[in-house]
Amino acid sequence: MDQPSIKGSAFQSVVADLRKLVDEGRVDLEELDLSEKDRGYLDAPITPVTWIPIDCYDRLLRVLSRVEAGSDPVRYLRDRGARAAERLLEGSYESFKVATGSWGLRVAKSFVGISGMLYNFSSWSVAQADDERIEFRVEDAAAMPDSALEAAHGFLSYYARLASGRSVVVNHERCDPGHVVIQVRTR
């Protein structure tokens, strides 16, 4: 698929949560500005290996944020990312689960592997990995919407806490449209 996309394994919970809001009457699909193609993803079975356009993922995340995030959409998206990490590491991405105390280059490379499985665009690499800090560089990231970047921030935060056994601080910066730097520090 040439279109920047995300794996169905990350998209399935977005669809499930949006369907739940519709069933609860908190969201009326007719009032949303979704294309027929976007709506089709809500009705079609999504398998973990299905590629979903990243812009559709972004639109649906923004709908969920408007309804559920309250005054802190960034925290909401990061929490979604952390829950996704927990779910995926207990399921289809179990082989990437890391032991507590395994912080460092191995963990950083493992996360790069996960990102390669989740996105069919962007190039993640490890710029630095030591006992206290890991820095990732994400190239070709112009198509990465801020909502997906915030969810990735939460995913990485969960993953780093799991690996280090300590609390972590994650910061990310979009240096230019196609380049993101993510730093993870242990405390």
Image: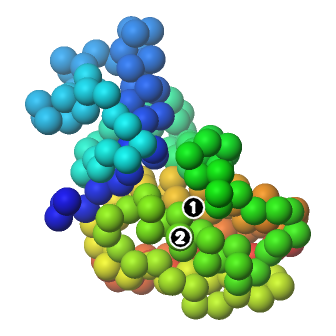
Q: What residue would you read off at disc 1?
A: 153
Left or right, residue 170 beside residue 43:
right
Residue 24 x %, y %: 44, 9
Please, what is the three-letter code of the amino acid marked with disc 2? Gly
Residue at (28% x, 15% y) in the render: 28
Residue 35: which quarter of the image?
top left
**Local crowd size for mark 2, using a 10 Å CA cut-off: few (<14), some (14–19), many (≥20):** some
Horizontal side of 35 relative to 86 (left or right) equals: left
Q: Which mark is residue 9?
A: none
Q: CA distance from mark 1 to mark 2?
A: 16 Å
Q: Is residue 6 above or below residue 107?
A: above
Q: Residue at x 81, y 82 (%)?
A: 132
What is the three-letter code of the residue carrying label 1?
His
| Residue bearing mark 2 | 113
Residue 186 point in image, percent of width and height: 81, 73
- Secondary structure of the residue carrying tag 1 is helix
Residue 42: x %, y % from top left: 28, 27
